[in-house]
Amino acid sequence: MDALGIPYVVEAPGVDEIVPPGTPPQHAVALLAERKARAVYARKPKALIIGSDQLASLHGNTLGKPEDAKAARAQLSSLRGRTHELFTGVCVIANGFVVTEVDTARLTVWPLSDVELDGYIRTNEWQGCAGSYRIEGRGQALFERIDGDRTAIQGLPMQRVTRILREAGVTFF
């Protein structure tokens, strides 16, 4: 949003992030993005709200935010040498306007050695990140291949967001 020159305020939605068991990750991120956006919109009904959420998925197994370094190492270990999907849900709400979409990126992790894996864990970049990586930092060295919108991988799919904002009547220039 900084790059677009649009002023904004970040506000924690304070919502429950539990979804029904068995919910596919692409549906879960859409549900959570909308839940977050609606919670903030309820407090700020005159604002334009953007909510988002992310989950990684490896062969149908969802990888959320790890609780600790041990969990992060286990997640990254399961990803090494493999391709997984990262789903990013985004919801924009403003005065009767509601659009929720999901972006999907496919990422292939290098077949990392234990030394590389432990080195990345020590950076603490994994904290608070679905899949235990942060692509905008040193984590970019984890990936052999990335297919998808890099901004979505960073947390907010800006191509989608700018299109949705235009649909909502936002002007950029």
Image (tube, rainbow, N blue to C red):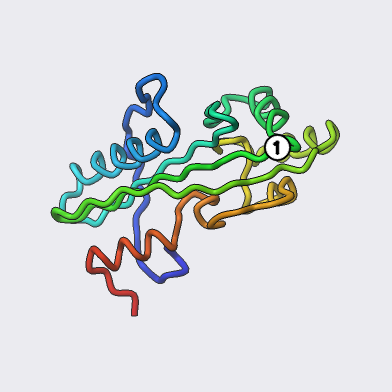
Helix, strand or loop at mark 1: loop
Which residue appears farthest toward the left when viewing the image?
Answer: 96
What's the residue at 14%, 55% (across, down)? 95
Count every numbered label the image shows and give the total.
1
Give the amino acid type for the residue marked by disc 1 in the picture: Arg
Placement of the C terminus among the 4 image quadrants: bottom left
Q: Is residue 122 above or below residue 137?
A: above
Pick the front one: 14 or 134: 134
Location of residue 97 (image quadrant): bottom left
Q: Position of residue 87 (x, y in %)?
A: 48, 42
Which residue appears farthest toward the front when viewing the image?
Answer: 59
Q: Position of residue 137 (x, y in %)?
A: 66, 52
What's the residue at 35%, 65% (across, down)? 163
| Mark 1 burial class by Cα count in 10 Å: few <14, some 14-19, many 20+ | some
What's the residue at 22%, 51% (across, down)? 98
Q: Is residue 149 above or below residue 58?
A: below
Location of residue 127 (image quadrant): top right
Drawn side of residue 140 relative to residue 160, left or right: right
Which residue appears farthest toward the top when viewing the image?
Answer: 21
Which residue appears farthest toward the bottom when viewing the image?
Answer: 173
What's the residue at 32%, 52% (across, down)? 50
Q: Is residue 22 above or below residue 96?
A: above
Q: Position of residue 10 (x, y in %)?
A: 37, 50
Q: Which residue is mark 1?
A: 82
Q: Position of residue 1 (x, y in %)?
A: 42, 63
